[in-house]
Image (cartoon, grey):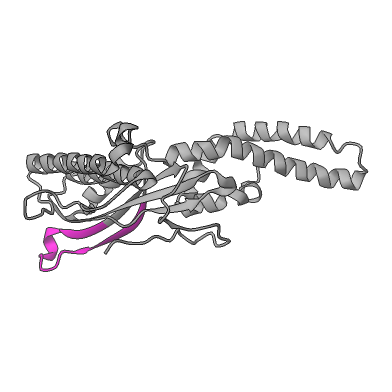
């Protein structure tokens, strides 16, 4: 199966989320079923050209085969990829029908729930986390934000992602979290008007070891809770003895979801011929 030739239309989708290896791994596992479906479709397409002359038949036959493979990939491979890498927002952080009447209140409640959960987990583990003057966790949320529609859906989902990222760091053994930042989400239009690829990033800065960093990353390598790795930086803690092994580590993780609509003021990026270009996004100061 010539994946290089038949995956071109969806290659941008794979590269844009930084998961080319994962995507092609999934394709490899299911290549038998995809190939069989492709062959069946190719035969149906080729049959329609049987009355043409030999040269044209050969050409059309090749086109039919490629079209069959393309259809098979669209129907089977892409849904499998999306399922593998899409973040499933916890039910408690979805925007219910009743919440839509006053999304700002819904967001404030979920933000408080996320903060209380992180605070309790940190206190139980004896971990230091950023806190405001009132001792509430400083998780980088926009406390005075006005949200509605798709932006409210995003804000609630962000609460879910952030509480789980910070919680995973504490569970991994991190005892000092220095900062939690909230870069703006981005929305990339998908081919054929199929909605938007939404990316919700969370930036975590902490003191720890490479073992703890690896534990955090491993937490989010499972279906339904997969997070894309963006930034990863580390260096020795300033002033710390070299032998104690403490590092200052920064990790940016991002939840990926497929959304039917994007906020009117969302940072978006359209199709590009550059496979290495990442979606543009605004950052909060």
In magenta stretch: residue 277: no
Q: In which quarter of the image is residue 226?
A: top left
Viewer-nearest residue: 10 or 258: 258
Viewer-nearest residue: 257 or 236: 257
Kindly tell me whether residue 205 is visible in this rendering.
no
Viewer-nearest residue: 246 or 185: 185
Q: Position of residue 37 (x, y in %)?
A: 66, 32
The residue positioned 6% from the left and 51% from the top of the image is: 134
In magenta stretch: residue 241: yes
- Relative to 177, is 86 on the left or the right? right
Q: In which quarter of the image is residue 221?
A: top left
The residue positioned 18% from the left and 59% from the top of the image is: 247
The residue positioned 46% from the left and 45% from the top of the image is: 261
Identify whether 240 is placed above or below 142: below
Q: Position of residue 85 (x, y in %)?
A: 42, 42
Quadrant where the N terminus sits is top right
Quadrant where the C terminus sits is bottom left
- Relative to 119, is 253 on the left or the right? right
- Relative to 256, is 105 on the left or the right? left
Q: Position of residue 280 (x, y in %)?
A: 43, 61
Kindly tell me whether residue 210 is visible in this rendering.
yes
Q: Position of residue 70 (x, y in %)?
A: 66, 42
Viewer-nearest residue: 1 or 158: 158
Furthest toward the front, the residue is 101
- Relative to 272, is 240 on the left or the right? left
The residue positioned 42% from the left and 40% from the top of the image is: 86
Q: What is the magenta range?
A: 229-250
């Amino acid at each position: 199966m010539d994946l290089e030739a038949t995956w071109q239309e969806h290659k941008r989708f794979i590269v844009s989320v930084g998961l080319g290896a994962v995507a092609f791994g999934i394709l490899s596992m299911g290549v038998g079923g995809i190939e069989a479906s492709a062959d069946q479709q190719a035969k149906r397409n080729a049959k329609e050209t049987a009355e043409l002359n030999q040269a044209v038949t050969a050409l059309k036959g090749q086109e039919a085969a490629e079209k069959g493979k393309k259809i098979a990939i669209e129907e089977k491979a892409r849904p499998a990829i999306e399922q593998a890498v899409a973040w499933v927002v916890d039910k408690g952080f979805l925007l219910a029908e009743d919440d839509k009447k006053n999304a700002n209140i819904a967001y404030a409640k979920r933000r408080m729930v996320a903060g209380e959960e992180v605070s309790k987990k940190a206190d139980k583990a004896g971990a230091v986390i950023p806190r405001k003057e009132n001792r509430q966790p400083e998780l980088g949320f926009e406390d005075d934000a006005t949200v509605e529609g798709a932006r409210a859906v995003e804000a609630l989902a962000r609460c879910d992602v952030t509480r789980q990222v910070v919680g995973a760091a504490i569970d991994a053994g991190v005892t000092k979290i220095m900062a939690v930042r909230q870069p703006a989400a981005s929305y990339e239009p998908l081919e054929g008007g199929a909605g938007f690829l939404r990316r919700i990033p969370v930036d975590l800065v902490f003191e720890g070891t490479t073992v703890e960093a690896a534990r955090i990353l491993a937490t989010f390598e499972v279906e339904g809770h997969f997070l894309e790795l963006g930034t990863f930086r580390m260096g020795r803690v300033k002033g710390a003895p070299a032998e104690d092994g403490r590092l200052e580590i920064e990790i940016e993780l991002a939840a990926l979801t497929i959304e039917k609509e994007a906020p009117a003021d969302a940072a978006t990026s359209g199709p590009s011929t550059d496979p290495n270009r990442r979606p543009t996004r605004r950052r909060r100061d």
